[in-house]
Image (cartoon, rainbow, N blue to C red):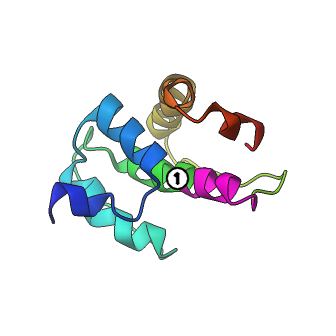
């Protein structure tokens, strides 16, 4: 799957952030995103460090951004992440604490902050 085609269903804000912050998606991410975006249960079998956790979070973040921009985001819990392992919990914590603030700061359309 071509690099540009991978991002064609993601919002330009999240696409830009991913590309500027992380570079190209991993093979695991490219293969998993279509199924995750369709709401299908998805099992990603790939080595440690291949972006499995971020694959799921990125789709969720993109969904929140698109809902916010369309004034469809309700003030409620939208993402629940249940981790079976301490290491995965730590990975998700790093994503939320380190990657998301960079994402928010990188937005060129700051008015979205009021919507989220």
How many numbered marks appear?
Answer: 1
Classify residue 27 as left or right of residue 89: left
The quadrant of the rendering that contains the C terminus is top right
Classify residue 113 as left or right of residue 81: right
State the image quarter where residue 22 is shown: top left
Image vertical order of residue 77 relative to residue 70, above or below: above
Does 42 lie within the magenta span? no
Q: Could you tell me which secondary element the residue under label 1 belongs to?
A: helix
Q: Residues within 10 Å of mark 1 (few under 14, many from 20)?
A: some
Who is closer to the viewer here, 1 or 44?
Answer: 1
Identified at 63% across, 31% down, the residue is 110
Who is closer to the viewer here, 48 or 50?
Answer: 50
What percent of the width, then of the height, locates residue 90? Answer: 50, 30
Identified at 36% across, 63% down, the residue is 33
What percent of the width, then of the height, locates residue 65? Answer: 60, 50
Does 64 lie within the magenta span? yes
By secondary structure, the bulk of the magenta-drawn segment is best described as: helix
Image vertical order of residue 116 relative to residue 11, above or below: above
Q: Give the range drawn in magenta.
A: 62-72
Identified at 78% across, 52% down, the residue is 77
The quadrant of the rendering that contains the N terminus is bottom left
Name the residue carrying label 1: 62
- Whether residue 43 is visible: no
What percent of the width, then of the height, locates residue 3? Answer: 18, 55
Identified at 48% across, 56% down, the residue is 59
Image vertical order of residue 22 relative to residue 15, above or below: above
Who is closer to the viewer here, 20 or 55?
Answer: 20
Classify residue 29 as left or right of residue 13: left
Q: Residue furthest left?
A: 2
What percent of the width, then of the height, locates residue 63? Answer: 57, 58
- Whether residue 9 is visible: yes
Classify residue 29 as left or right of residue 116: left
């Amino acid at each position: 799957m071509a690099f540009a085609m991978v991002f064609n269903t993601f919002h330009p804000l999240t696409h830009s952030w991913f590309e500027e912050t992380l570079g190209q998606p991993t093979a695991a991410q490219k293969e998993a995103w279509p199924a995750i975006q369709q709401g299908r249960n998805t099992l990603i079998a790939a080595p440690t460090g291949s972006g499995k956790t971020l694959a799921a979070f990125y789709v969720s973040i993109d969904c929140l951004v698109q809902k916010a921009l369309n004034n469809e985001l309700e003030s409620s819990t939208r993402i629940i992440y249940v981790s079976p392992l301490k290491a995965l919990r730590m990975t998700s914590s790093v994503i939320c604490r380190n990657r998301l603030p960079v994402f928010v700061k990188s937005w060129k359309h700051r008015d979205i902050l009021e919507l989220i």
